[in-house]
Each structure stands twice: as structure tokens, then as C-alpha cells.
Image: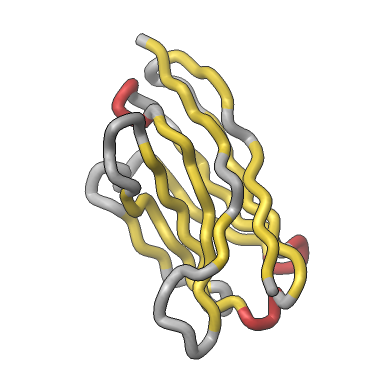
Amino acid sequence: QVQLVESGGGLVQAGGSLRLSCAASGRTFSINAIGWFRQAPGKEREFVAAIRYSSSSTWYADSVKGRFTISRDNAKNTVYLQMNSLKPDDTAVYYCACTREGVATYDYWGQGTQVTVST
């Protein structure tokens, strides 16, 4: 099994920045990629960004391209989401999740961290 723990959420003014962390533990050797998702009140969960664990390949939702950066520190088994130029529309609970080798879906999820962007 893999355990994922997010941290770094909080309240920030529009235009500000936050860095989220996703710390992985357990069978981390089985991780293929880690992604960030978010869910705002009354909305469906949406993909934000992802990074392949063994390479530098990254993917971003169009809504965050140029503002968010995903990165990893494999030695610490931690993935980061640097969020700049935050907007009120970025307000949501942010979750990290992982895919594993041989598994097509994100099957381990963290508990989420709240990000609130005020006007």
C-alpha cells in the first residue's frame, strides 16, 4: 500500500502563492505517477497537474498552465505543487493521488488540504 499526506494549504490573497506538498510512504517503489486534483464546493473533482515519478514528464490542466509548477524530490518521496498568481477560482480542496505500475487509475489518495484564495 501507499500512503499520501498533503500539506501546505491555507488562506491567501488573490495574486499570492502557496506551495503544496504530497509526502508518500509505504510501497513508494510501486508509484508510477503522482497527480494533484482539486474539488471546489458544488463542483466535480478536476485534474490539476501530474508528474511521472521516474522522469521529469509533467502534465497540466489548461487552467493552471503558466501559474502552477509540479516537481518532485524522490529522495524525500515528496511531490510539490507551487501555485503562483492564485485566483479566487483556485479555491478548493486539493488532493494528491498516485498511479502504480500496472494500474491504470489513481488508486491511492491523500486526505486533502484546503486552499482558499480571497479577493
Residues 26 and 54: in front is: 26
Compared to 71, does 99 lie above or below?
below
Judge from the rendering whether residue 40 lies leftward or rightward of residue 6; answer left or right: left
The colour mode here is secondary structure
The N terminus lies in quadrant: bottom right
Compared to 55, does 50 lie above or below?
above
Residue found at x 40% / y 55%: 49
Q: In which quarter of the image is residue 90?
A: top left
The C terminus lies in quadrant: top left
Judge from the rendering whether residue 67 lies leftward or rightward of residue 83; answer left or right: left
- Residue 86, percent across and down? 39, 27
Which residue in the rendered view is the most extreme toward the front? 42
Which residue in the rendered view is the most extreme toward the left? 62
Judge from the rendering whether residue 24 lies leftward or rightward of residue 40; answer left or right: right
Residue found at x 56% / y 65%: 108
Residue found at x 55% / y 58%: 109
Compared to 92, does 57 lie above or below?
below
Compared to 96, does 59 lie above or below?
below
Which residue in the rendered view is the most extreme toward the top? 119
- Residue 99, percent across and down? 50, 74
Q: Quadrant of residue 3?
A: bottom right
Q: In which quarter of the image is residue 78?
A: bottom right
Number of marks present in the image shown: 0
- Residue 18, percent across and down? 54, 31
- Residue 69, percent across and down? 45, 49
Residue found at x 34% / y 54%: 47
